[in-house]
């Protein structure tokens, strides 16, 4: 569903995908215009179960591959490739909500046993993209290289490759130039994956390694609730609420605002009732977080003013001015300081008038179940790798692999 109202838009993309497939079959253009905590420590020592040195597959892995029903599935010639001209939700100045649960699974043309639900995309089968991808059980795939980098979080099942086994909630970063061969077990796997959205200029203390992984023990909702920090919006709102309640003129110092035992207790209560967040990865270009939001609460999620925030619902459901964010919904909320930014209307196609949010917060209402979110910020205004360069490199690698296979 797409609603246009003076450049205000809302999208669940159920009809969009069908249109794209029809256009792809015709070979026509497919264009849709819709518009101070440190990162978790990563020292390598704690990651023996998460990060495996690059080496040839061992005997156990070779045997496991032989036991699977389908080894290196061929290209699916029955499905036409996506159009290279495809543009889907690519305007980063536009706020948009995509409910992937309303989409059909699109089988890829590259391989049997893989299907996807498109969220944002520039390009066809080789693209800068954010996608929900489903791998059917018991399959192995040829090794491939990430010429533009890859990051993903496991939504269900377990991801397997030479680096290890990664169950639900695991977050993986495979840097530019990395390679792996997926090895899918009997439970299959569903992931949220982002391709060609990294940059070689990350300004980290140390260069980003080829592979990083943060697993369930760190990123489970239980651990986020236990070790995460309160969402800053809840803390700020608590301070302001205490200030207004105790002294309407607002002239007291910060220390005076929360100085009494009663006020500190009140602020702690507000923190406990709000969401918790854990920073997973941080560079000058982007910050990746996971958030756990409690049931039956209204939570204000901070939105960076000159950038914005991306939110993906891993578990649960919530509502906002955009509509319902059910499981596996994705939203881009653009900051008010972004040039040309356009807000999103509601499902009734009414323009948002600012009555529910402050300019720097995104207000969500949580239902009877807790909500667990993947979040990213900073990336909307940051550089990305040259897509055409990454595409040509990948095509060259594919051609070289095919030539070697034909020898």
Image (spheres, rainbow, N blue to C red):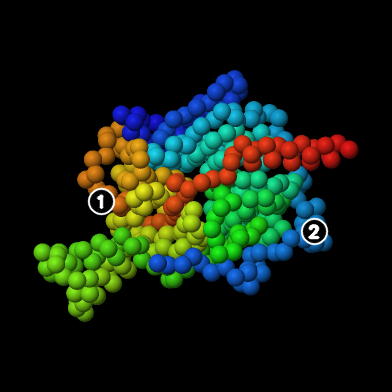
Is residue 236 in view?
A: yes
| Above or below for 228 versus 298 | below
Secondary structure of residue under mark 2 = loop
Residue lying farthest to the right in this orientation: 407
Select label 1 or label 2 by which is in front: 1
Going from N to C along the chain, the mark reached first, 1 or 2, is 2
Q: Is residue 58 above or below residue 201?
A: below
Position of the C terminus by quadrant: top right
Instruction: Give the structural element (helix, strand or loop) at label 1.
Output: loop
Q: Are marks 1 and 2 in contact (CB under 8 Å)?
A: no
Q: Is residue 378 left or right of residue 154?
A: left
- What percent of the width, then of the height, locates residue 389? 64, 39
At 29% across and 65% down in the image, what residue appears? Answer: 235
Q: Residue at x 83, y 37 (%)?
A: 403
Residue, x 14% and y 65% (percent of image)?
Answer: 250
Determine crowd level at label 1: few under 14, some 14-19, many 20+ residues with C-alpha closer than 10 A.
Answer: few
Is 25 in front, or is 7?
7
Which of the pair 95/388 is nearer the observer?
388
Res. 56 mark? 2
Percent position of residue 201, x then y = 56, 53
Residue sitting farthest toward the bottom = 261
* Percent coordinates x, y for residue 228 in the rendering: 42, 68
- Above or below residue 386? Residue 48 is below
Instruction: Identify the residue at image location x=50%, y=27%.
Output: 31
Q: Which mark is residue 358?
A: 1
Q: In this rendering, would 392 be left or right of 22?
A: right
Residue 343 is labelled as none
């Amino acid at each position: 569903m797409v609603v246009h109202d003076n450049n205000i838009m809302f999208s669940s993309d159920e009809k969009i995908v069908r249109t794209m497939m029809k256009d792809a079959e015709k070979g026509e253009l497919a264009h849709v215009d819709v518009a101070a905590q440190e990162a978790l420590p990563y020292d390598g020592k704690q990651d023996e179960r998460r990060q495996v040195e690059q080496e040839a597959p061992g005997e156990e892995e070779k045997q496991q591959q032989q036991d699977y029903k389908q080894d290196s599935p061929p290209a699916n010639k029955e499905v036409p490739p996506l159009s290279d001209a495809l543009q889907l939700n690519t305007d980063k100045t536009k706020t948009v909500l995509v409910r992937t649960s309303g989409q059909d699974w699109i089988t890829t043309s590259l391989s049997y046993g893989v299907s996807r639900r498109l969220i944002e995309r520039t390009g066809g089968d080789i693209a800068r993209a954010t996608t929900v991808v489903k791998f059917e059980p018991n399959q192995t795939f040829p090794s491939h290289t990430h010429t533009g980098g890859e990051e993903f979080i496991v939504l269900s099942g377990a991801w397997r490759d030479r680096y290890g086994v990664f169950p639900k909630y695991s977050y993986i970063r495979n840097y530019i130039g990395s390679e792996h061969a997926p090895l899918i077990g009997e439970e299959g796997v569903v992931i949220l994956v982002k391709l060609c959205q990294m940059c070689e200029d990350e300004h980290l203390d140390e260069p980003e390694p080829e592979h990083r992984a943060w697993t369930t023990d760190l990123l489970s909702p239980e651990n986020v609730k236990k070790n995460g920090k309160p969402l800053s919006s809840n803390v700020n709102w608590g301070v302001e609420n205490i200030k207004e309640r105790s002294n309407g003129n607002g002239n007291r110092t910060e220390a005076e605002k929360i100085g009494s035992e009663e006020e500190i207790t009140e602020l702690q209560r507000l923190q406990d009732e709000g969401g918790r967040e854990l920073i997973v990865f941080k560079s000058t270009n982007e910050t990746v977080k996971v958030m756990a939001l409690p049931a039956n609460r209204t939570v204000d999620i901070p939105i960076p003013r000159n950038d914005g925030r991306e939110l993906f619902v891993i578990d649960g459901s919530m509502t906002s001015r955009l509509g319902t964010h059910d499981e596996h919904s994705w939203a881009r909320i653009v900051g008010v300081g972004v040039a040309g930014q356009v807000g999103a209307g509601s499902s009734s196609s009414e323009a948002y008038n600012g009555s529910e949010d402050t300019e720097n917060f995104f207000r969500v209402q949580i239902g009877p179940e807790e909500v667990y979110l993947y979040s990213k910020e900073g990336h909307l205004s940051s550089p990305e790798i040259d897509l055409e360069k990454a595409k040509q490199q990948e095509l060259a690698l594919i051609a070289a692999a095919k030539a070697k296979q034909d020898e």
